[in-house]
Image: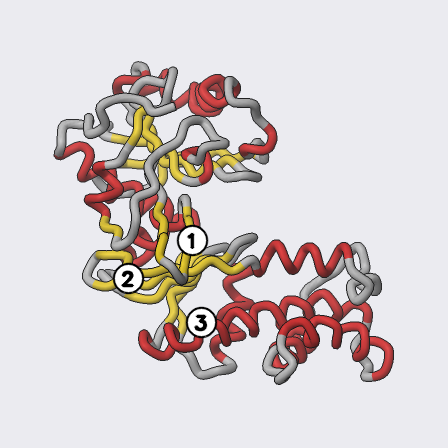
Amino acid sequence: MDAFVAVDWGTSNFRAFLVDAVTGRCLDETRSSSGLRNLSHSDFPVYCRQQLSDWLDAAGGHDRLPVYLAGMVGARSGWAEAPQPALPLSLQTLAAGLTSAPDFPNAWLVPGGKIVTPDHVDVMRGEEVQAFGALSLLGQTGGLCCLPGTHSKWASLRAGVMEHFTTLMTGELFHAVRCHTLPGEPVPEDDRFDLEGFERGLVAAEHPAGVLHALFEARSRHLHDGLAAGQVGSFFSGVLIGTELLAMGSLIESHGEVVVIGSHTLGERYRQALGSRGIPVREVGSDAASIAGIQLLHDIHARAGGSLDPGPRR
């Protein structure tokens, strides 16, 4: 069978999918919590071989099953450093920068992307693949993609080219405020999403004093305005996602629609926040987006004979 392996390997997690190269159908998958922070440099090829051994053996060896690795695995702190070309970015640019993974035949690290201008310096690894893949699944060559997470990305694409992106530390700031601040102290250990608390946070995000005041309102409202302990975490989420949408307001207005790429649970919060502002939303799961994006790269790579990179870069 003509197949390939799509890997999304980040700081916290490893996800791999065995994919039918003709249909794009996921044939099997494996996941673990062994992200970059859990491995030393020499562990990468050994760990990857362990995770993929059944698929590699069934295919008859490494040479018969190409492996594409996207995400922070291609960062300087990962397996080996893949290029990070400057925008504008196309699939052809990504395919041309595929980098051989050291000590693992027929494995390729996927490039990321960067912006370096006097007023905006930014980087991404992994989200570029998901953005191209999600739009392909929707039959689009352009759109505004929101990829929520620890470091949320908003990427604008037109005519098959990524023209701009912005990173916002929404998820990481949420964790810090919820777990390490005075306003976050009431949050219970078994904190669950509360829609009312979330919606109150969305409103607070629009306070003229900005996000620094809006986050503190979680304490004030818990003390004097009926915000329950079980609503404080969701209030923080509403404040931060609401602030994110305000920051991306001009982009949202120019596109008129947002493609949210991620887990359904987190994507639902963005759908609710965008819906409250009358913004149409289309949702694509992160796994499906990763698989579709890597399939596009595999097709280009295969047409070029499967060897675009002159050799591993360390």
Q: Secondary structure at mark 1?
A: strand
The residue type indicated by label 1 comes to Asp
Residue shown at the point (80%, 73%) measured from the top left: 219
Q: Nearer the viewer, residue 72 or 45?
A: 72
Q: Which mark is residue 122?
A: 1
Q: Is residue 295 above or below residue 117?
A: above
Q: Nearer the viewer, residue 153 or 84?
A: 84
| Left or right, 102 with reference to 64 | right
Residue shown at the point (65%, 76%) measured from the top left: 201
The residue type indicated by label 2 comes to Leu
Q: Is residue 133 above or below residue 67?
A: below
Q: Is residue 187 above or below residue 26?
A: below
The residue type indicated by label 3 comes to Met
Whichever of callouts 3 and 2 sits on the residue coming sooner in the sequence is 2
Q: Label 3 belongs to which residue?
A: 248
Res. 29 visible in picture: no
Q: Whole-Å distance between the Cαs marked 3 and 1?
A: 15 Å
Residue density around tag 1, few if under 14, some if 14–19, many if 20 or more, within 10 Å: some
Residue shown at the point (19%, 26%) measured from the top left: 307
Q: Secondary structure at mark 3?
A: loop
- Asked if the residue under mark 2 is in contact with the one under mark 3, i.e. CB atoms within 8 Å, the reply is no
Instruction: Give residue 93's quadrant in the image.
Output: top left
Which x, y percent locates residue 31?
Answer: 52, 35
In which quadrant of the rendered image does the C terminus lie? Answer: top left
